[in-house]
Amino acid sequence: MLTFSRLGKTLIAGLAATVFAGSAMAADMTLKLGHLANEDNIWHKAAVKFGDELKTLTNGRIVVEVYPNESLGKEMDLINGMQLGTADMTISGESLQNWAPMAALLAVPYAYKSMAHMDEVAGGEIGDKIKAQIIEKAKVRPIAYFARGPRNLTSNRPIKSPDDLKGLKMRVPNVPLFVDVWKALGASPTPMAFSEVFTSLQNGTIGAQENPLALIKSANFNEVQKFVNKTEHVRSWIYLVISEMKWQKLSDADKKNVMEAAKRAQAYERELFLADEKKLVAELEGKGMTFVDVDGAAFAAKAKTAVLANVKPEIKPIVESLFGK
């Protein structure tokens, strides 16, 4: 029977201790980042980029594990977990208004006239107030923001001004703000589940719908709609957030590392986003859709009253100021 000498056992024990010590040194902290998008989505790619940058900046002491496809939990469950200290990070947007009313500003129809205007708000004084309230009320800390594709109206006739909407029956999400805005613009909005939209367009129950270009393409609406009218009626952003409990456990140096990694991830996401939007336009045109320029100022002016009637009093003055710009 083979036996080990005392020296052999000591060497093996020492080797094992060295291996485990090396693993501990390699990662002092692991952050679990769960989100709802799939692996091809640019938010996922930006989340992975954040992890890569943070690992480099901390010499491997902080590792980020990214879980796409809600594999770590649904958005609201993750936020609740972050508040309790059982989850670390996620990507979230206006859902945060369940705790912080100012988070509704992330997606207000016609509040942002361009991406530059949106960036000015998100990265400026108003954005700072939104983030401060989210930290205070939701107990999660926004560390970066990602752009979302603006929502556009598809139809089988060109829509250039609100007057062209008369008699147009269109699908909208079951959101009172959206319903009221499209009514004010002159359309006949019909709340409907997204899964029913293609068939309803196909059989003529509705004549139009509105969504970002990525969803217009993935849902194959080009097969039942001829025009993409560039209403860009909702521009919005979404935050990469970290649990405030986890944030407070970081050293000052690592807080700086997290913010630097987030800054790099945000820049990377924007680069991917702009390229993706161009690609989507080309792909939809290639599938036979025609893009139509619209009178954005006329749409915004007609929608303003409905928007202001639907926002909470706490953010109404800010929304009024945004419309005034």
Image (spheres, rainbow, N blue to C red):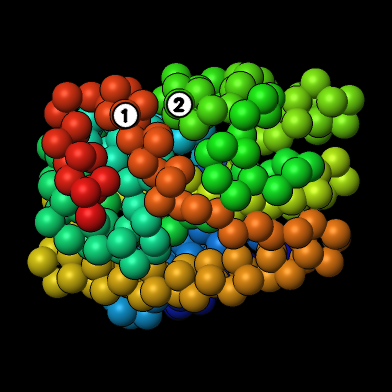
User: What residue does disc 1 label?
Assistant: 305
SS assignment at label 2: helix
Query: Which image quadrant is residue 264 in?
Result: bottom left
Camera-nearest residue between 7 and 152: 152
Q: Residues within 10 Å of mark 2 (few under 14, many from 20)?
A: some
Give the residue type at disc 2: Ala
The x and y percentages for residue 238 are: 39, 50
Is label 2 in contact with label 1 (beta carbons under 8 Å)?
Answer: yes
Q: Considering only order in the chain, which callout, 1 or 2, is on the residue closer to the N terminus?
A: 2
Residue 260 rendering spot, x and y as whole percentages = 26, 74
The quarter of the image holding the C terminus is bottom left
Image quadrant where one finds the N terminus: bottom right
The reply to whether residue 168 is visible in this rendering is yes
**What crowding class fits label 1: few (fewer than 14 Cα within 10 Å), some (14-19), or many (20 or more)?**
some
Is residue 37 in view? no
Residue visible at 38% across and 68% down in the picture? 266
Relative to 93, say whether 179 is above or below: above
Q: Return the residue at label 2.
A: 184
* Res. 68 mark: none
Label 1 SS: helix
**What's the distance in space between the residues labelled 2 and 1, CA to CA?**
8 Å
Between 182 and 27, the residue placed more toward the observer is 182
Relative horizontal placement of residue 251, taking residue 205 as reference (left or right): left
